[in-house]
Image (cartoon, rainbow, N blue to C red):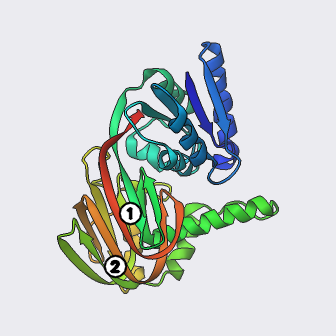
Amino acid sequence: MYYFIVNPSSGDGKGVEVWNNTKKYLNSRNIDYEVYFTTGQGDARNKAKELTESYQGPLYLVVIGGDGTINEVVDGAVLGQNVAFGFIPAGSGNDLCKGLGLPSSTRKSIRRALADGKIDKLDYGVVSCGDTGCIRRFMVSSGIGFDAAVCHSILNFRSEKKKRPFLPADPGYMLTGIREFLAAKPSRGYIVLDDSRRVEFNNILFISAHICPFEGGGFKFAPAADPKDGSLSVCVVSTPNKLKLVSALLWARSKGLRQKSGVRFFECRELRIHTDKPMAVHTDGESCKYQTDITIRCIPGQLKLVR
């Protein structure tokens, strides 16, 4: 028996199309399944929690949606030896798909998730936000500053779009990123790596901690990130002159961000971040509001995913 959690509105409606193709595949092979459709934020998290809490025996949970949908599922699920996940991408960014080398075509993704794939044990991350009590898992990345502000802006637009359908089309990551980059105001702060090394910065634009290399719809901010190495790949962008970083960020879109003046990389199992002023925080593109202190940890090899 396969259990599906489907976000029909992901990818501007692509989720429905992908589910219909998946259903044809299932029915043509007489495969037993149950399907649950999300209708709003938090639905995927709640359904994943409900299924994994009550199910006896091995459970195979297949997600159809974008990075935000599988983030909710992994965040809400009660993880254990008997729980494995499949992912059929239907989002607009699909950074998890890129980072894991999953097939981009729907047909290949369906076959891989339902028949041909092997189960890998992957790392995942956990972010804890100061004294607010917000604790979230993630599979791709979590960050604070400019990159999170882009995610917040896109989420806010899509929320307004549902209320007011006459609004123009989704501007996407690139246009939103340009606007937020121009508006970004750096902050002083520091990071602490594995409780042993403290590094201070005067002009933090953003800090991102990665399990997988990509975020923001294909920006390779952590070229060295490996979802099976048991560590976080950390990117810190800190400079008083934002314009000097334009070429580096554009290069990240095509080839991958490189270490240069204003860009530094670190590896660790646990990362503490402090900024002197509140900055936007995200996990896999989902909002964790504005924070000054967050802790990010890597949980090695505890997530079972068919790939």
Q: Which sits earlier in the primary sequence, circle 1 or circle 2?
A: 2
Which quadrant does the N terminus fall into? top right
Instruction: Look at discs 1 and 2 and give the one toward the viewer.
Output: 2
Q: Residue at x 59, y 33 (%)?
A: 4
Tell whether 183 sits left or right of 12: left
Could you say where residue 110 lies in the image, as x and y percent from the top left?
54, 28
Give the residue displayed 41% in from the left and 64% down from the top: 128
Locate the C terminus by quadrant: top left
Residue at left offset 79%, top offset 62%: 163
CA distance for labels 1 and 2: 17 Å
Asked whether, in this view, residue 182 is left or right of residue 222, the answer is right
Q: Residue furthest left?
A: 196
Does dot 1 land on a helix, a strand or a loop? helix
Nearest to the observer: residue 33 or residue 87: 33
- x then y, percent, for residue 33: 61, 23
Instruction: Please tell me which residue is depicted at 49% across the width and 29% down the height of the picture.
Output: 60
Image position of 38 with respect to 211: above or below: above
Q: Residue 6's image quarter?
A: top right
**Residue placed under numbered mark 2 in the picture:** 238
User: Type of residue at label 2?
Assistant: Ser
Considering depth in this image, is 47 or 171 the residue closer to the camera? 47
**Pointer 1 residue:** 251
Q: Is residue 118 left or right of residue 49?
A: left
